[in-house]
Every structure is written in structure tokens, then in C-alpha cells.
Image (cartoon, helix red, strand yellow):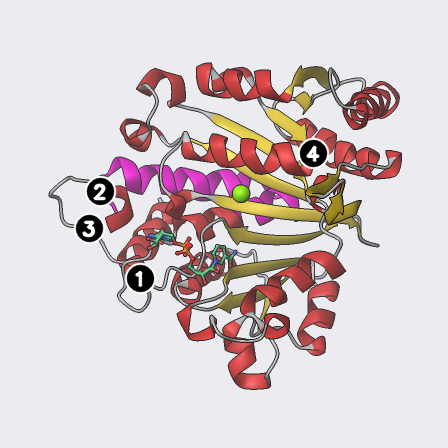
Amino acid sequence: MANPSLLILPGDGIGPEVMAEVRKVIDWFGSQGTPFDVSEDLVGGAAYDAHGTPLTDATMAKAQEVDAVLLGAVGGPKYDDLDFSVKPERGLLRLRKEMDLFANLRPAQCFDALADFSSLKKDVVAGLDIMIVRELTSGVYFGEPRGIVTENNERVGINTQRYTESEIERVARSAFELARKRGNKLCSMEKANVMESGILWREVVQRVGDEEYPDVELSHMYADAGAMQLTRWPKQFDVIVTDNLFGDLLSDLAAMLTGSLGMLPSASLGLPMANGRPKAMYEPVHGSAPDIAGQGKANPIACILSFAMALRYSFDMGEAADRVEAAVEKVLADGLRTADLLGEEGRAPVSTSDMGDAIVAALAD
Ligand code: NAI
Ligand code: MG
């Protein structure tokens, strides 16, 4: 079988710095007999500087061909005054749109060594490992009609929540598939009590579960109750699936239970390709962090954990993913901290590259 193929798009700011550490991890797997076919290209401001566009057609075509795309971050003050059509973010949006990445996976995973870092009590978050699946390409952010109109001499702001059955079905399937790879438990969140789109959502998710995933334990919760439960006792959940708007809020809420932006990975998945793997892009949640770029201060863990997600969800290499996560756990337990993980503590931080080296050393243990 062909080696798994990866397109790496480091992007701007700390993107290339954290991606250099991911390359060390990928190279380590290569040295152990698990090689990846890696190609690298430009995106965002870096692509604009070279080609006058944040994503060339050639790069877009490559992204459609590979098994998975791994992206660093895009943007920075240098590009703030560019015309909207060539802003770095447009490169990212084009990738998401043309690959039709409708399922956004946001894990909230708490490493024991960082449990004190959470705003919640230690026993509420220690060992937490949940996944929020947010529908990413439809719902109220895209529904028509929309706009600001004048009626009866006053302005009215309008947005429309809209979901077709097939849009709900496909994101539900992604979530059920994930649940099967994890704890076999899925909770769907909407507001079926006050929204018709929520009634349809609940009905369709239930039907997909009954017909195709009877082995997965399915429950439903109103999204506001879900927000309360996520802060009260998040460990009751395994996989949560929800719409674009609720998912935007709930995934940010859940992520912050566990600490720093520098720790948070994500995946965006689309439909299965001919080889059965889903179209996929993996990226840290954070941006290009211009305030610390070029100083060796960036935490590479979010990007390294994004690669671990690629191992698990694109390549069915769950054990390899576990190994990367265990290596991260180990270096944190050993006390290594980049500056973002130190808060007010007086300890000396380690550099981006030292953190990457330590994780590779821990992989080998
Ligand atoms: P940001 O995520 O880049 O930074 C927010 C804060 O978190 C900064 O203080 C930064 O130093 C810190 N931080 C972020 N990642 C870190 C890491 N790995 N290690 C240590 N500290 C880290 O968000 P911000 O400042 O709002 O945006 C900066 C630029 O990034 C803008 O141009 C924005 O448009 C872009 N951006 C790009 C995203 C992407 O490529 N997906 C997402 C968010 C913002
Ligand atoms: Mg958000």
C-alpha cells in the first residue's frame, strides 16, 4: 500500500516554528518504519508574498489529492491592510470550502500535569477527554435570507437557521464514526424545544443512529443545558455533536476547561474519498501569534496534537496517536513548560525547539 500522504502548509508567524517540531515527530515515525509522503507548500501571507494570492490553484489541487492537510496558522499585522479578497484568512477559507469540510472536531483533553491550570476544580477536569463535533458549513452563519433591512421605519437584522436533512445526516455520521473509535457514546445537542431546525436535527440524528449505529449509545440534550453540564461535570460526555452556532460556543467553552490555546488541536473532516479516508485538514486552534513569532517561545504541542489527530482519524493509527499523546503527557509530567503554560510561576520556560526535542525523546522511550 502507498505511504500515507500529507500536505504541510506552515503559513505565517509561529506556524512555521511549530510545524518544524511536527516534522521532527513525523521523521521519528519514518525512522521507525512508518514513513509518510510529505510535501510542503505556502498558504496565507507567505503565499501572498510569493504569488500574490493566499492560496494558489496548484496548492488547492494538491490539497484535494493528499490523504490529509496539516496547517500551521495564517495572518499577521503585515497583511492587515490587504484587500479582503487576498487576505491570508481567505486561503484557509478556500481550503475549508473547496474540500467541503463540514465536520469540525474540537477535543477538550486535560493532561494531568496541567489540571491545576484549569479554571475549574482539579478533580472536575483531571483525565478529561471529550470531543465536540461542530457542523461547519451550514446553519445560521450561512442561511438565507440574511441582512439588515428597513421595516416600519426601523432596521431589522436577519439571519436564518437552516439545515437540510442531508446536512444533518452527514455530520451525524461523522460523529457516530468518531464515537465508535472512542467510547461508543454520542450526545447530540440542539434546542428542539424552541427551534424547528432543532426538531429536525434531533429526528435525523436519532434515525441515523437507529439505522446505522445501533451499537453507539445516543442521547439528546438541549444546548443550554449542555453548556451547564459541560462546566458542572464534563466527564459525563464522550462525543458531542451540534450545529454550527452552538458548536462555536460549546467548543470554545469546552476547550478552555483545559488550559492554554497553545495546547488545543483541531480537525476538519469532509466526505470519504475513494480510498475510504475522509477529506481532512488538521490545524491548531491558535493563530499566528505575531506577539511571540520568531522568538522561539511558541508552544508546539497544539500542532503536534493536531498531527496525532491525523494519525487517529485519517490513518487509523490509533496506537501511534496514543503514543504521541503519551509523550506529551510525559514531558509535561517531567515539568517542561513553554512560557504560555507557566502563568505567574517564576520557573524558566523551555523553547519551542527544546519542547519538540523532548517530545521526540519521550516517543522513543
Ligand atoms: P493568536 O491565537 O495568534 O494569539 C492569541 C494569544 O495566544 C497571543 O498572546 C499568542 O502569543 C498566544 N498564543 C497563541 N498560540 C500560541 C502558542 N502556540 N504558544 C504560545 N502562545 C500562543 O490570536 P490573535 O492574536 O487574535 O491573532 C493573530 C493573527 O493570527 C491574526 O492575524 C489572526 O487573524 C490570525 N489567526 C489565524 C488563525 C488561523 O490561522 N487558524 C486563527 C486565529 C487567528
Ligand atoms: Mg469561536
Separation of residues labelled 4 and 3 (CA atoms): 39 Å
| Residue at x-position 86% and y-position 21% | 207
Determine the main secondary structure of the stretch shown in magenta. helix
For discs 1 and 3, the disc positioned in front in the rendered view: 1
State whether residue 1 appears in this view.
no
Ligand 1 location (quadrant): bottom left
Between residue 222 and residue 179, name the one nearer to us.
222
> In this figure, which residue is indicated by the disc labeled 2?
342
> In this figure, which residue is indicated by the disc labeled 3?
349
Circle 2 Cα neighbour tier, 10 Å, few/some/many (<14 / 14–19 / ≥20): some
Q: Position of residue 264 (x, y in %)?
A: 45, 43
Which mark, residue 42?
none
Asked if the residue at label 1 sits under 8 Å from ligand 1, the reply is yes
Between residue 136 and residue 41, name the one nearer to us.
136
> In this figure, which residue is indicated by the disc labeled 4?
243
Under mark 4, the amino acid is Asp
User: Which of pointers 1 and 3 lies earlier in the amino acid sequence?
Assistant: 1
> In this figure, which residue is indicated by the disc labeled 1?
291
Q: Look at the image and give the residue range highlighted in magenta.
A: 308-337
User: Which of pointers 4 and 1 lies earlier in the amino acid sequence?
Assistant: 4
- Is the residue under label 3 in contact with that under label 2 (CB below 8 Å)? yes
For discs 1 and 2, the disc positioned in front in the rendered view: 1
State whether residue 230 appears in this view.
yes
